[in-house]
Image: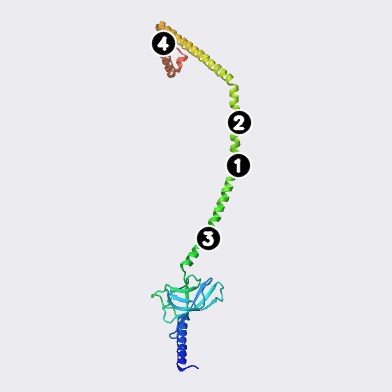
Amino acid sequence: MTTRSQRARIGLFTILAGALLAIVLFVFGGLRLWGGRDHYTVTFDGSVMGLQKGAQVYLNGIRVGSVENIELAPQDLDKVHVEIAIKDGTPIHTDTRAMLQMAGITGLKVIDLRKGSLAAPVLPPGSMIAQGETTLDKLEKQAADLVDQSTQLMGRASKVVDNLIAATDPMSEIAINAKHTSANMAAASAGLDATIRENRAGLKQTIASVGESAKSAQAMIDGQIAQILANAGDLVAEMKGVVRDNGGALRAAVADLRQASRSFKELSREVRQKPSRLLFSGSQRDRKLP
């Protein structure tokens, strides 16, 4: 049979356990016994894996609320609507952005509100908070861009390789033809060398004969030129002797030619002036009028 003191102890333990339970529910369950809560909506593009109902909501790292509901967008299955409830009076502005962040290494995610400024208007409750980009999101986009650029570069490199292959095929044919030509030239050179070796004695004799013929022709030409020059000298000497021996007669003949030339000029002048002189040698007498 229990005594009064035991019942008092049991009652005190029950009261303490209830108080502790209420404190736990208040702290860990996010219960708010005093003060209201403002509701906002955030639309995320893509998957929100790791985000659950009851997940914490932070404003620049300070806990201000929790996630109350998660559902797909009715008109776009690639988007997710997340409803959050935050403490009344939390400064949410029009330039505030909501971003998903990892909560430790467990894979769970929370919502972090950032980039709000006092200069921007206050966002009224019930409005939609725009999605922001985390560093990880930016890296993912840059990685996707790099993958696209790498794909394009690989395509261009493949085209360049194809063009090189197409360009080197004619070069291979040219190299083969050049090789054949070189072989033919080598064979022709060998044949020419053999021909020269076989006919070297004849070539030497021919060259010697040509040299002797050239010498003979040169000697003959030199002799004929000397003879012509000697004959020309003799002719000039003879002409000088003739002129010297007949100088007086030549001068008299030249004087006679000059006198005859003057007489002929005077006769021509008189004929032009008096053509009747050709018919009458004497001078005509003046005729008397009846």
Q: Residue 112 appears at what percent x and percent y?
A: 45, 73
Q: Which mark is in front, 3 or 2?
A: 3
State whether residue 61 is above or below residue 158: below
Colour setup of the view: rainbow
- Identify the mark nearer the N-term, 4 or 3: 3
Q: Looking at this view, is 83 or 205 the one in front?
A: 83
**Comparing labels 4 and 1, the label whose residue is closer to the camera:** 1
Could you tell me which secondary element the residue under label 4 belongs to?
helix
Front position in the image: 261 or 231: 231
Q: CA distance from mark 4 to mark 2?
A: 85 Å
Q: Classify 10 Å Cα crowding around label 4: few (below 14), some (14-19), many (20 and above).
A: few
Is residue 286 among what the camera can see? no
Mark 3–mark 1 Cα distance, whole angstroms, equals: 39 Å
Foreground label between 4 and 3: 3
Screen quadrant of the C terminus: top left
Which one is in front, 280 or 249?
249
Q: Which residue is mark 4?
A: 254
Q: Circle 1: is it few (<14), some (14-19), or many (20+) Cα within 10 Å?
A: few
User: Closer to the N terminus: mark 3 or mark 2?
Assistant: 3
Residue at the far front: name it. Answer: 1
Q: Secondary structure at mark 1?
A: helix
Task: Left or right? Give the position of 197 relative to 17.
Answer: right
Q: In the shown orientation, is residue 32 left or right of residue 79?
A: left
Q: Amino acid at mark 3?
A: Val
Q: Circle 3 sits on which residue? A: 147
